[in-house]
Image (tube, rainbow, N blue to C red):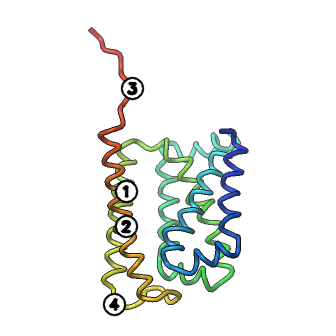
Amino acid sequence: MSGKRYAVGGAFFMAILVLPPVLRWMESSMIGVMLGQIPVLVVAGWLFGFALPRRFIEWLNCWNENGLPGLLLAISVLTFWLLPRSVDASLNEPLLRLAKWMMLPLLVGMPLSLSWKRLHPIARGIVHTNVISMLVVMGWLYLSVPVRVCNSYLLSQQNALGRMMIALAIVLAAFWSLRLFVVTTPNEPTTR
């Protein structure tokens, strides 16, 4: 796929999210924001990363040689936008909403797309296990905390998000575990 197609794909995802009915629907529940809007913004940035000019990617690779700097940047920014206080602020303050819409694609999705293939397979496995454990811990917290953590959403929505996060963690753990046993590596020539 050419760079232009990746850019069009990223722009398409962002354009869909901006449509008023989609925006209202996504932001009407915690599940829509945390498991819908945020991941789609990251995926749009991921696609934009593949659309960057080769010369610019080579320049970025000078500081992102093994993929860890880009991964750390992405994790740091994503962690900020997953905090309940940041979710509330992005719903109620236009400047923070704009910041979320710019930062998630540019500082999470793009660095991930530029870093993922450069990461050592063990580092990728660590990321997978941390995603699963983070989903379980956040899900458990949303279920066990007796008060609302987001002022914009009801306790019932918070509990529903907790259940969804735990279910998603189980699905991802099963999927990534199956890939370990099903995906085959290319045959290497044997030496005699």
Residue marked by disc 3 = 186
Q: The disc labelled 1 sits on which kind of residue?
A: Leu
Q: Nearer the viewer, mark 2 or mark 1?
A: 1
Q: The disc labelled 2 sits on which kind of residue?
A: Leu
Dot 4: what SS?
Answer: loop
Q: Which of marks 4 and 2 precedes in the sequence? A: 2
Q: Which mark is residue 146?
A: 4
Q: Position of residue 165 (x, y in %)?
A: 39, 69
Residue marked by disc 1 = 172
**Furthest residue to the left?**
192
Please name the residue shown 71% across and 51% down the image.
Answer: 8
Q: Which of marks 4 and 1 precedes in the sequence? A: 4
Q: Which of marks 1 and 3 precedes in the sequence? A: 1
Q: Quadrant of the N terminus?
A: top right
The answer to whether marks 2 and 1 mark residues whose Cβ atoms lie closer than 8 Å is yes
Dot 3: what SS?
Answer: loop
Please name the residue shown 69% across and 57% down the image.
Answer: 12
In depth, the one of 15 and 41 nearer the eye is 15
Count neighbours of disc 4 (C-alpha within 10 A) and say few if under 14, some if 14 to 19, many if 20 or more: few
- Estimate the spatial distance between the alpha carbons at disc 1 and disc 4, rounded to whole Å: 27 Å
Q: Which of marks 3 and 2 precedes in the sequence? A: 2
**Furthest residue to the top?**
192
Q: Quadrant of the C terminus?
A: top left
The answer to whether marks 4 and 3 mark residues whose Cβ atoms lie closer than 8 Å is no
- Estimate the spatial distance between the alpha carbons at disc 3 and disc 1, rounded to whole Å: 25 Å
